[in-house]
Amino acid sequence: MQVHIALKKIVDNSYDITIDTLPKIHFDTKVAVVTNPTISKLHLDYLLSKISAKELHVITLKDGEEYKNQESIDTILNSLFEHRFNRKSMLIAFGGGVIGDMTGYAASIYQRGIDFIQIPTTLLSQVDASVGGKTGMNNNYGKNLIGAFHQPKAVYIDPHFLTTLPEREFGAGVAEIVKMAVTFNKDFFEFLEVADLKKPEILQEAIKQAVQTKADVVSQDEKEQGLRAALNYGHTFGHVIENETAYKRFLHGEAVAIGMVMANELAVKMNLMSEKETLRVKALLEKYNLPTSYMIDDVKRFYETFFLDKKSSDSAITFILPLGIGDVVITDKVDVGTVMCVLNKFGKM
């Protein structure tokens, strides 16, 4: 005996990404702004001058990747319960990638899902983390291993927020821009090689191109079943580095920069990329004072940590490797000896 449940339907999760001065926005519902003390001190008054709501609350989380955890998620959820938020209520993620990921995840699980919008305040979150609907948190086993795909209703990228961005945070965002250029857009990479991203009009163009690149990829592969995984170039190595250093030594973009250098070494070893191309990528990263080296304490342990990566299976590690500059391959056909050879180049002598 069988009972069939027919659930086939087309769901339109499309939304707009606005790159401009934040407009005035009114919400005819309860709204909670999720932020941290750093952003609150610098920009909360500006945000509150732009938005209004039937009822407006501010939820402040501790600042830092180490607080991207269940305790912070519970802080958001408890506030929503205490203020009797319902399924028509709205969350606003107001901060960098950590705030965006946690706000989106809390929205995805509160009463089985409510809406949220992204108002990213760092370069990294503007060009990458706020776009595409990946939400989540970290745990002891690794980064973003708990989460959900939950698309925002809108993204507002206001360059105003970047005026107070520290130098390291700026560089971390550049790393994600470089990632998208290396994997998908050779012309964009060549633009970045000669561009001065410290000039506002040039930076805004770079943001636009990076966001358009990611939007094109997400449109083709929302749930990361194939092509979208290419946007994790540098992350397979970078996430292990973040895990080893307890998320305290490097910003996310800095770890990704090192991860790209490591991935490039593997690509050279497999004859997918030339030495000259790796030097061009390294030079572009170093132009913005990004780290490009890392000393691995225990090569074997580093290798084993790869298996906690979401893209890997029980017996194979998935690597995202550049095919020169402007193209990419996703493969789990890399033998252990080749990977270990590359890791040993970064290991202690």
Image: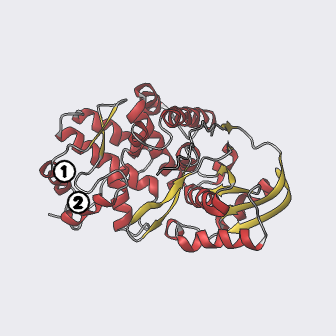
Is residue 260 visible in the rendered image? The answer is yes
Pinpoint residue 2: horizontal percent, then vertical percent: 48, 50
Q: Are marks 1 and 2 in contact (CB under 8 Å)?
A: yes
- Please tell me the numbered disc located at residue 85: none
Residue 31: x and y in percent read: 78, 58
In the picture, measured across the screen, residue 58 lies left or right of residue 302, that is right
Give the number of marks: 2
Residue 339, labelled with which disc?
A: 1
Quadrant holding the C terminus: bottom left
| Residue at x 54% of width, y 71% of height | 70
| Label 2 crowd (10 A; few <14 / some 14-19 / many >=20) | some
Please, is residue 288 above or below residue 104 in the view? above
Which element carries disc 1, helix, strand or loop?
helix
User: What residue sits 41% from the left and 31% below the top?
Assistant: 184
Task: Give, as a three-letter code, the residue at label 1.
Answer: Val
In front of the other: 213 or 226: 226
Cα separation, mark 1 vs mark 2, equals 8 Å
For marks 1 and 2 on the same chain, the one whose residue lies earlier in the sequence: 2
Residue 264 location, quadrant:
top left
Above or below 8: residue 150? below
Q: Residue at left 55%, top 32%? A: 212
- SS for dot 2: helix
Residue 180 pos. (x, y %):
44, 37
- What's the amino acid at mark 2? Tyr
**Can you identify the residue that label 2 sits on?**
303
